[in-house]
Amino acid sequence: MARQLSSVKDLTHGNTYKLMVGFALPILLSQVFQQLYNTADTLIVGRFLGTNALAAVSSSGTLIFLLGAFFIGTAQGAGIVISRYFGAGDKDKVSKAIHTNVAFGLVAGTLLTVVGVTLTPFLLQWMNTDPAVLPQAIEYFRYYFLGSMAMVMYNTLRSVMNALGDSRRPLIYLVISSLMNIALDVLFVGVLHWGVWSAAVATVISQAVSMVLCLAHLCRKGHIYSVSFRKIRFDGAILKEIVKYGLPGGVQNSVIGLANVIVQSQINLFGAFATAAYGAYAKIEGFAFLPINSFTMAITTFVSQNLGAQEKGRARQGARFGIITSVLMAELIGLAFYLFAPQLIAIFDSTPEVIEFGVTQARICSLFYGLLSFSHAVAAVCRGAGKAFVPMAVMLSVWCVFRIIYIIVVMRLLHTISAVFWAYPITWGISSTIFLFYYLFSRWQDGFDDKKAAREPPDLEPSEA
C-alpha cells in the first residue's frame, strides 16, 4: 500500500509510549476545544441571562447525550473496523468502511433531527424540568437539534480520521470552530441580547464549520482514502461488522444517558438552583476528564490497529500503558477539583445556593475519578479488541440498572441530593471491579481471531506525528 495520505499514521511500528502520547495529545487539545462549545453556552448564558437561563441550558445536557449517544456510539464501530483493516493493510475494506460510515452518519443525522425536535417538550417534562425553566429549555433544545446533522457528521468524519491515526487535523478544525462559537455566543447573547436559543444557534453554526472542514479534507482527490460522493453507500458485509462492533457502544451510551436523565430528573426536583449547579458541575467534570478521554480514544485505535496487524504483544503493552496513565491523571485532576470546587463552580454562577449544590457534588465524586477512568480505559481496550459487548453488558447492568434502582431506593428512604450524587462513585467502583477481573483473566487480545483476518503487515510507511 503506497503512502498517499500524509496525515495517516501507522501505530503498528515504533515506540509504543511515544506513539500513544503523540496520538493522544492532539485528541486532548481537540476535545478541550470541543468542550468549549457547550461550556461557552453555559458560561455566557449564566452570566448574561441569569440562573433560569443557565438551568435551561443545563437541563438539556443529559437529554442531548441520550438522543445523540446511540447514533454516535454506533458510528464509532466504523472506527474500529477502519483501524483493524488499516493495520492489516487492506485498503479496499478501509475505503468501504469509510463510505459506509459516512452513509450511516447521513441517516443518523436525519433521524436525530426529527426525533430531537419532535420529542423535546415531552422529554423535558418527563425529566421534571422546573416550570419556570421549561420554555427556555424547549427553545434551546429545539434549535440545538435542528443542527443534528452537523454534530453527527463531524463526529463521523472525525472518527474516520482518528482511525487512520490522524488526530492533528480534527484539532485544527475544532480550534477554528470553537473560537467561532465563543465569538458568536458573545455577539448573540452578550451584545445583541438575544434569548437562550441564540446560544444553540451559535453552537450549530460552529459545528457545521468543523464538519465542512473535515469533509473538504477527506474529499481531496488523489488519496487512497478519499471520500467520493458516488461511493457513499452501505456495503452489507462492512455494515454488519460496524453494527457488530458499534451497536454495543451505541446501546451502552444510550443506557448510560438514560440513567443520567433519570438522575437529572431527580436532581430537578430540588429546584432551579440544583439544576444549574448540576449543569455547572457537569461542564467542569467534562473539562477535567478530557485527558482521560483522549487516552481512551488512543487506546482503542492503538489496540485495534495492532490486533489487525497481529501484533498482540504491542496491543497489550499499549493497553497497559494507557490504563495506568489514565488512572493516574484522573486522580490528580480529581484532587485539584476537590480543592478548588467553590471557585470553579462560581465561574458559572456565583449564586450561593448554586455554589453549595455544585461543591457538594464535586466533593462527593471527584476523588473517585480514578475508578471512572479505569472503567473507561478497560472498556476502550475491549472495543479496540472487537469485544464491544463486554463494556455494554457491564455498563448496562451497573451504570443503568443498578444506578436506577439505587436512585429509586435512596429517594424514597432519604430524599437528599447528596444520596443522589453518591450513585456515581458507587457504580464506578462496582464496574471497575468487574472490568479488573475481565482484563486480568480473559483473552481479550484474541477478539478478532474468530474472523478471517489479513496476516500481512501494512506496507504503509510511518508518517510524522
Image: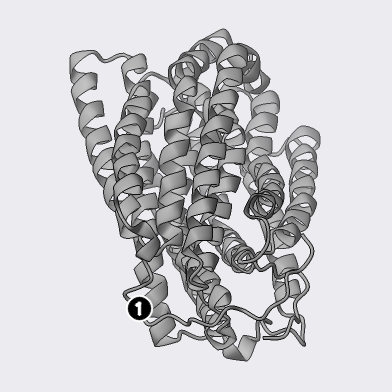
Q: Indicate left or right for 300 with 253 as reference.
A: right
The structure residue drawn at horizontal position 27% and vertical position 51%, both measured from the top left corner, is 393
Give the camera-side residue of 291 and 44.
291
In this orientation, does residue 202 appear? no
> Up-down: is 455 above or below 325?
below
Q: Nearer the viewer, residue 256 or 442?
A: 442
- Label 1 environment density (alpha carbons within 10 Å; few <14, some 14–19, many ≥20): few
Q: Can you say which quadrant of the picture contains the C terminus? A: bottom right
Compared to residue 58, the image places residue 414 above or below, namely above
Question: In the rendered view, does 50 fall on the left or right side of 441?
Answer: right
The image position of residue 317, as x and y in percent, is: 52, 52
What secondary structure is marked by label 1? loop
**Residue that appears at 52% across and 14% down:** 359
The residue at the point 54 percent across, 52 percent down is 318
Question: Residue 156 in the image: x percent, y percent?
Answer: 57, 66
Is residue 23 in view? yes
Q: Total of numbered circles in the picture?
A: 1
In the picture of the structure, the residue carrying the numbered disc 1 is 451
Of the residues shown, which amino acid type is indicated by label 1? Lys
Image x and y of residue 192, in percent: 78, 38
